Image (cartoon, helix red, strand yellow):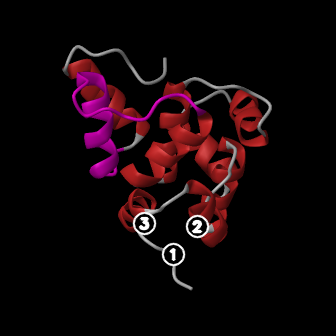
Amino acid sequence: MAERDTGQLEHELKAARGVEGFLATNPEELEHYTASEYLHKLLAEKGLKKSEVIKDSGLNPEYASHIFAGRKNTSRKYLLAIALAMGLTTKETQHLLHYADVGELYVRDPWDSVLWFALEHRMTVMETNLLLHKLSQSPLCK
C-alpha cells in the first residue's frame, strides 16, 4: 500500500467515530522516530555519507557524531545546519525538528523565514550564514 498524504489522514481522523479505530486501521501510516533514527533513515535514502554531512555542516565533528548517535539533545540551530548539509527539503526538515522536539520552522518568524528560504533554494550552511548576517539576523552556527 502506498503511503497516504498527511491531509488524507487528517481528513480520515476528523471523520472517525473514535481514535481507536483510526489507530487500529493505520499502524503503517504512523511514524515513531527519534531525531537520530530519522537522520539515519535520510542518510540511507539519499545515499549520503555521515562524514561528508558533518564536514558540510560546519559543526564540531565529535559533537555532530553525538547528534547522529542520539547521545546529545541538540539545539535547533545545529539540526538546521545538518539539514542544510544534507540538502533536506523543508518537509523533511520540519519532520526532523518535530522528532527532535525543538519546534518546527515558523514562516512568520524572520529568522525562520530565512532558513526556510535557504532550504528551498538548497543553500549551504556558509551561504545561509552570510544571508543571515546580511539581514542582521543571528548566525546559524558560530
Within-10-Å neighbours for mark 1: few <14, some 14–19, many 20+: few
Picture coordinates of residue 29 (x, y %)?
58, 67
Q: Are marks 2 and 1 in contact (CB under 8 Å)?
A: yes
Look at label 2 and name its amino acid.
Answer: Glu
Mark carried by residue 3: 1
Residue placed under numbered mark 3 in the picture = 12
Residue drawn 31% across the image and 29% down it? 112
Residue placed under numbered mark 2 in the picture = 29
Q: Quadrant of the N terminus?
A: bottom right
In the displayed image of the protein, which residue is found farthest to the front?
Answer: 17
**Magenta highlight range:** 101-123
Picture coordinates of residue 91 (x, y %)?
40, 53
Of the numbered discs 2 and 1, the one sitting upstream in the chain is 1
Residue 88 relative to residue 26: left or right: left
Picture coordinates of residue 99 (x, y %)?
60, 41
Q: Are marks 3 and 2 in contact (CB under 8 Å)?
A: no
Within-10-Å neighbours for mark 3: few <14, some 14–19, many 20+: few
Picture coordinates of residue 86 (x, y %)?
52, 51
State the separation of the CA atoms marked 2 and 1: 7 Å
Look at label 1 and name its amino acid.
Answer: Glu
Q: In the rendered view, would you say 1 is above or below 15?
A: below
Q: Circle 3 sits in a helix, a strand or a loop, which is it?
A: helix
Residue drawn 53% across the image and 40% down it? 98
Of the numbered discs 3 and 1, the one sitting upstream in the chain is 1
Q: In the rendered view, would you say 85 is above or below 74?
A: below
